Image (cartoon, rainbow, N blue to C red):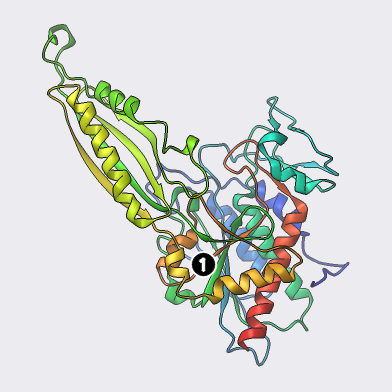
Amino acid sequence: MLDRKPDSRFPSLVDRFVSYAKIHTTSSEESETYPSTERQWDLARILVDELKALGLDDVAVDEHCYVTATLPASPGLENVPVVAFIAHMDTYPEVSGENVVPTFHENYQGGDIELPKEGRKILADENPYLQKCLGETIITADGTTLLGADDKAGIAEIMEALTRIHENPDWRHGPVKIAFTPDEEVGTGVKYFDVEKFGATVAYTMDGGQRGEVENETYCADSATVTFVGRDIHPGYAKGKMVPSVKVAGTFLAGLPREGTPETTEGKEGYIHPIAIKGNTSETEVTLLIRDFELDQLPVWAEKIRKHAAEACAQWPGSEFRMEIKEYYRNMKYDLEKEPRAMSYALEAVERAGMEPIQGSIRGGTDGSVLSAKGLPTPNIFTGEQAFHGYGEWICVKDMELATETMLRIIEVWTEKES
């Protein structure tokens, strides 16, 4: 392990995380700009300054708010494949990320964790991973916001790893690239990311959960928009004539089975998830997410949606519907299989860091899904973030330390095996 110097000029891992968490960087689903919120630039500019202070080369933030930098290889190791680490700056838009107050719970001894405000608790029964954190320090928000460990823990861990390398100049390593991206939480984090220009052989998103886990699978993801068309007429003269599309949509939603939904599935089970409805008597639009680990199952789920929409219209003569499928991302396992070193070296690094490696899958997607499809193999590494996207988000400081150590070991493995 690379030690921090006692007289370090740089903030500690935890201090960095706290400072990043306090910066409001929530993204927006409704925005038509990129990045979706101007406030994400605030963190980007800070990170540029901090990367420059650590002596990295090519530090820049471009017009899309992508922060990038290069840690040059030690002399004689310039031909080692370039390894990159990536984290996103934005936080989940459905829970407030403004005025975050990181709250410390030291020497956790089990049981529920009471948050200071709003009477909220982190329930131990719903967070079994807490049992692995006994005696450790837990960081939460105060109950009025999310914490933002997703993904500011990843950013802090990357910066900590760079700091330790900076303070230990005799430690030999290959070339390393860094990228911090916006808008991951709204699905467009690497929309404009230039993989060829970035120049990495492999990358690792620092955006996972429990210690020791390296994730090489994500869902294949589509969305379906079903628009129900009715017939509007003055309600005073509507008998036998009006066909209210809102009610047709309601019939459709009521007819969807509970099986095959997020609240009834786990592991590698796929699902359909209605997330939005808007409309009026004439037309009503329902948006649904379609998720499955197997690509060939996406059309199967889409056909189920179509079948239920047709059945709803059959109950409302005179109505009809149209349906549009939009592709989002694909299971990154298909692309990672083309570069097996990305996973095997990461799993070895976890072991070198003193943990049992866990090869996992994500019931969701990451920037790595898109990057892998673009030709940059990008597994996902744990950061310690837990219960993200809610008021009960938390992280264990020990996991943040282990994630930092894992990054250093990843660089070490690539350097040893490929030099």
Q: Amino acid at mark 1?
A: Thr
Residue in the image at 43% along x and 59% along y: 331
Mark 1 secondary-structure assignment: loop
Q: Residue at x 72, y 57 (%)?
A: 400
Instruction: Name the quadrant of the N terminus.
Output: bottom right
Residue at the image position 68 percent from the left and 40 percent from the top: 127
Front in this rendered view, residue 245 or 132: 132
Whether residue 57 is situated above or below residue 360 in the rendered picture: below
Q: Position of residue 405 (x, y in %)?
A: 73, 67
Left-right relation of 210 to 217: right
Using the rendered view, name the quadrant where residue 351 is placed.
bottom right
Residue 286 visible, this orientation: yes
Q: Residue furthest bottom?
A: 76
Let me know if residue 69 appears in the view: no
- Image quarter where the C terminus lies is bottom right
* Direction top: furthest residue: 236
| Image position, residue 323 (x, y; %) | 23, 41
Which residue matches tag 1? Answer: 378
- In the image, is 207 to the left or to the right of 294? right
Instruction: List x then y, in percent, for residue 227.
Output: 23, 34
Image quadrant where residue 44 sits: bottom right
**How would you rate the neighbour count of disc 1 (Cα within 10 Å): few for under 14, some for 14-19, many for 20 or more?**
many
206 and 220: which is toward the camera: 220
Depth order, front residue of 205/162: 205
Report how many numbered discs are placed on residues in the image: 1
Which quadrant of the view contains residue 293? bottom left
Q: Is residue 230 above or below residue 67?
A: above
Estimate the x, y position of residue 244 in percent, counting from the top left.
21, 20
What's the residue at 45%, 61% (across, down)? 369
